[in-house]
Amino acid sequence: MAGVIRLTYEELRAAARDFQQASQEVEQTNQRVNSRAAQLLGGWEGVASQSFMQELESCQRQTRR
């Protein structure tokens, strides 16, 4: 049958755990990136630093969708 997906409850729970773990890993990565960006931007001024921060924030918004 096309379009039919069959899973046991345990398979569904395992998939949910995998997604939860991946979500936590993405959040931890975002936190590390933010920490490093803050260090970098502490001594970086001007248009380039503003452009970098805008791009970084855009990328992070996409990971939170």
Image (tube, helix red, strand yellow):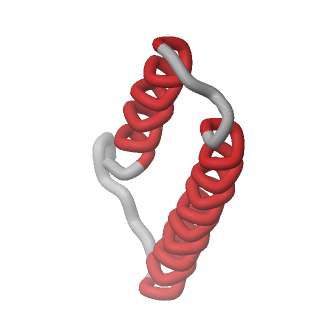
12 relative to 49 in the view: left or right: left
- Figure check: 15 above or below 62: below
- Figure check: 57 above or below 13: above
Q: Residue furthest top?
A: 47
Q: Residue 48, located in which quarter of the rendered image?
A: top right
- Figure check: 10 above or below 5: below
Quick one: 56 or 38, which is closer to the camera? 38
Can you give x and y, in whole percent of width and height, for residue 49 in the image? 54, 23
Can you give x and y, in whole percent of width and height, for residue 9 in the image? 43, 86
**Which residue is at 45% across, 42% downward?**
60
**Which residue is at 51% across, 73% downward?**
20
**Which residue is at 45% across, 76% downward?**
12
Q: How many labels sit on residues? A: 0
Quick one: 38 or 57, which is closer to the camera? 38
Quick one: 20 or 59, which is closer to the camera? 59
**Which residue is at 61% across, 48% downward?**
38
48 relative to 39 in the view: left or right: left
3 relative to 35 in the view: left or right: left
